[in-house]
Image: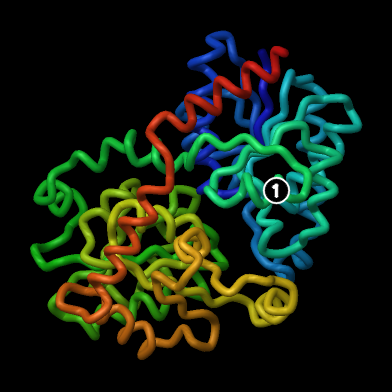
């Protein structure tokens, strides 16, 4: 059968790639077209547009790139019509993908939405759109099935796909000495810096992270580079911090090696916890975007770790609270010997037990094939 997938950012690219492998396991004749990235290209040919042309975050950024967004939507609709897939699988990236869902529904195509829009956080009005335009909603957080069921939407939940990604990441098998040699790291204990996968996120968040290195001379600091951003981006932003290393293509291995991490809010907060590493969650963005978000987002916390556990298990420093001094204090508290470290590690252990068993993507792939062929 024929499957068209739409992804808009690096984390979605990784999830979609695993789902594609699950589909191929149940449908050996599967044919793909997609808006995606490097991870999806490693699974199958058929890339129509690279995600680097899609990744835009925030209200003001969307306004300033509106013409490009409209052009990409038109390209997506035309590519879907030309391919005439048996199923369209929309992965996260809700603003763009819900508009594509509307088009596909009207065209009579079967629509899967993988990684549900975070309507439990904001834009609850999207529930009606999901109900009307999406045939199958596939969720990845343990509290979501009950949340959506209370609002009349059945979901498919097989666990969180990060379980599979981590189980299949061969870089995690690399020994400590070999990993450090490959990436120009010395023998000091490590702190991992995860500033996000969008250029806007790096511009707002990497500066404070990099300045931490001078405050912890007994540790070395390394940035996990996102695969969708060019090497020159990191080299330019870190030009005044040559002591901060850049690690390419081994984010999970970097985090696993670290004693602690400073992480920009997003999927990376959950990945870090699942790798058993204490973290400080930080985020700074465009002032207008944050001003708007604070008036419409109804969550007490923004990190997935805290949302899943229902309490502040990891410290969050947002916008004006994300300062060098605050981050230094919170990082010190979770490093070995820090007063918060044991409590954070205990909370991480609880979370790891709620994320499902290995084989999530294979089970979801079978469900997609079964429902598409029904």
Q: Residue 249, relative to residue 200: is it above or below?
A: above
Q: Position of residue 275 (x, y in %)?
A: 30, 52
* Colouring method of the image: rainbow
Q: Residue 91, relative to residue 212: is it above or below?
A: above
Q: Position of residue 354 (x, y in %)?
A: 42, 48
Could you say which is closer to the camera, residue 308 or residue 360?
308
- Total residue callouts: 1
Q: Which residue appears at 33% of the width and 82% of the height?
A: 330
Q: Which residue appears at 57% of the width and 67% of the height?
A: 200
Quadrant in the picture for residue 136: top right
Judging by the rendered image, the residue that carries numbered circle 1 is 148
Q: Position of residue 195 (x, y in %)?
A: 44, 66
Could you say which is closer to the camera, residue 133 or residue 11?
133
Could you say which is closer to the camera, residue 307 or residue 55?
307
Report whether residue 39 is seen: yes
Q: Residue 227, relative to residue 135: is it above or below?
A: below
Q: Which residue appears at 32% of the width and 49% of the height?
A: 252
> Disc 1 on helix, strand or loop?
helix
Q: Residues within 10 Å of mark 1 (few under 14, many from 20)?
A: some
Q: Is residue 75 left or right of residue 91?
A: right
Q: Is residue 278 left or right of residue 158?
A: left
Report whether residue 7 is seen: no
Q: Quadrant of the N terminus?
A: top right
Q: Is residue 125 left or right of residue 25?
A: right
Q: Quadrant of the C terminus?
A: top right
Q: Which residue appears at 31% of the width and 84% of the height?
A: 328
């Amino acid at each position: 059968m024929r499957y068209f997938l739409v992804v808009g950012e690096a984390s979605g690219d990784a999830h979609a790639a695993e789902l594609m492998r699950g589909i191929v396991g149940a449908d050996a004749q599967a044919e793909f077209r997609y808006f995606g990235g490097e991870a999806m290209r490693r699974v199958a040919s058929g890339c129509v547009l690279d995600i680097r042309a899609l990744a835009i975050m925030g209200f003001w950024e969307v306004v300033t790139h509106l013409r490009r967004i409209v052009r990409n939507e038109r390209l997506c609709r035309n590519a879907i019509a030309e391919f005439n897939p048996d199923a369209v699988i929309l992965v996260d990236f809700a603003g763009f993908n819900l508009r594509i869902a509307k088009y596909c529904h009207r065209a009579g195509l079967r629509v899967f939405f993988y990684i549900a829009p975070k309507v439990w956080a904001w834009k609850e009005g999207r529930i009606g759109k999901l109900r009307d335009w999406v045939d199958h909603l596939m969720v990845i957080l343990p509290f979501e099935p009950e949340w959506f069921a209370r609002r009349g939407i059945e979901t498919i939940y097989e666990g969180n796909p990060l379980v599979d990604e981590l189980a299949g990441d061969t870089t995690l098998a690399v020994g400590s000495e070999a990993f450090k040699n490959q990436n120009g790291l010395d023998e000091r204990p490590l702190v991992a810096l995860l500033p996000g996968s969008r250029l806007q996120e790096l511009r707002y968040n990497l500066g404070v992270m990099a300045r931490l290195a001078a405050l912890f001379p007994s540790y070395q600091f390394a940035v996990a580079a996102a695969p969708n951003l060019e090497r020159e981006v990191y080299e330019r932003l870190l030009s005044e911090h040559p002591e901060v290393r850049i690690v390419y293509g081994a984010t999970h291995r970097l985090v696993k090696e670290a004693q602690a991490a400073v992480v920009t809010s997003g999927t990376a907060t959950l990945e870090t916890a699942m790798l058993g590493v204490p973290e400080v969650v930080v985020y700074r963005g465009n002032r207008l975007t944050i001003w708007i978000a604070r008036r419409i987002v109804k969550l007490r916390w923004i990190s997935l770790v805290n949302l899943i556990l229902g309490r502040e298990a990891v410290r969050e420093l947002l916008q004006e609270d994300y300062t060098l001094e605050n981050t230094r204090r919170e990082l010190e508290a979770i490093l070995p010997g820090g007063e918060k470290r044991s409590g954070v590690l205990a909370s991480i252990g609880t979370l790891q037990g709620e994320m499902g068993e290995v084989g999530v993507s294979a089970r979801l792939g079978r469900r997609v094939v079964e429902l598409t062929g029904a």
